[in-house]
Image (cartoon, rainbow, N blue to C red):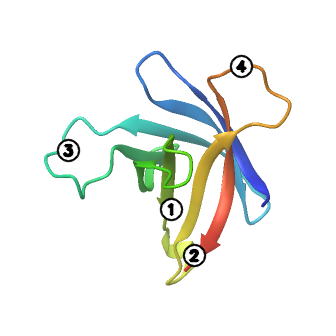
Amino acid sequence: MPAIGYVTRGEDGGYKGEFELFSQRRPIQLVPNRRKTTPEQPDFVVNSDRLELGGAWVRTSEMSGREYVRLAIARPEFGPHTVYANLGRAAGQDDPDAFAIIWNAVN
């Protein structure tokens, strides 16, 4: 599955990097959601520049038992669609805090 961007985990537990959609490279930040009060709310708020794009949730893989981050990005430019992606280990990276944003599906 293709990578649509790359992020690095920061000391605050959030992530910063760049992503590409519709042939445009944009900054992306996953900011820890300090206002989370229920399990359904996202663990991170996904932003680009000053726009909120969606949310991200920490999930546990049923197969490996490892945690990963699942993103859901929606914008009016996407029409009625939501882009889903996961953070995965970036190919060729030795840095444990470097991740690829791996496109998963559009719904």
Q: Which is closer to the viewer, label 4 or label 3? A: 4
Residue lying at 49% horizontally and 68% vertically, measured from the top left = 75
- Residue topped by disc 4: 95
Q: Nearer the viewer, residue 68 or 4?
A: 68
Q: Earlier in the sequence, mark 1 or mark 3?
A: 3
Q: Earlier in the sequence, mark 4 or mark 3?
A: 3
Q: Earlier in the sequence, mark 1 or mark 4?
A: 1
Q: Which is closer to the viewer, label 1 or label 4? A: 4
Residue lying at 74% horizontally and 66% vertically, measured from the top left = 22
Marks 2,1: beta carbons within 8 A: yes
- Residue topped by disc 2: 78
Q: Earlier in the sequence, mark 2 or mark 3?
A: 3
Disc 4 crowd rating (10 Å Cα; few below 14, some 14-19, many 20+) is: few
Residue lying at 86% horizontally and 30% vertically, measured from the top left = 92
Q: Quadrant of the N terminus?
A: bottom right
All told, the count of numbered labels is: 4
- Residue topped by disc 3: 36
Kindly identify the amino acid type of the residue bearing the numbered disc 1: Ile
Q: Secondary structure at mark 2?
A: helix
Q: CA distance from mark 2 to mark 1?
A: 9 Å
Q: Earlier in the sequence, mark 2 or mark 1?
A: 1
Q: Position of residue 7 (x, y in %)?
A: 64, 35
Residue lying at 48% horizontally and 67% vertically, measured from the top left = 74
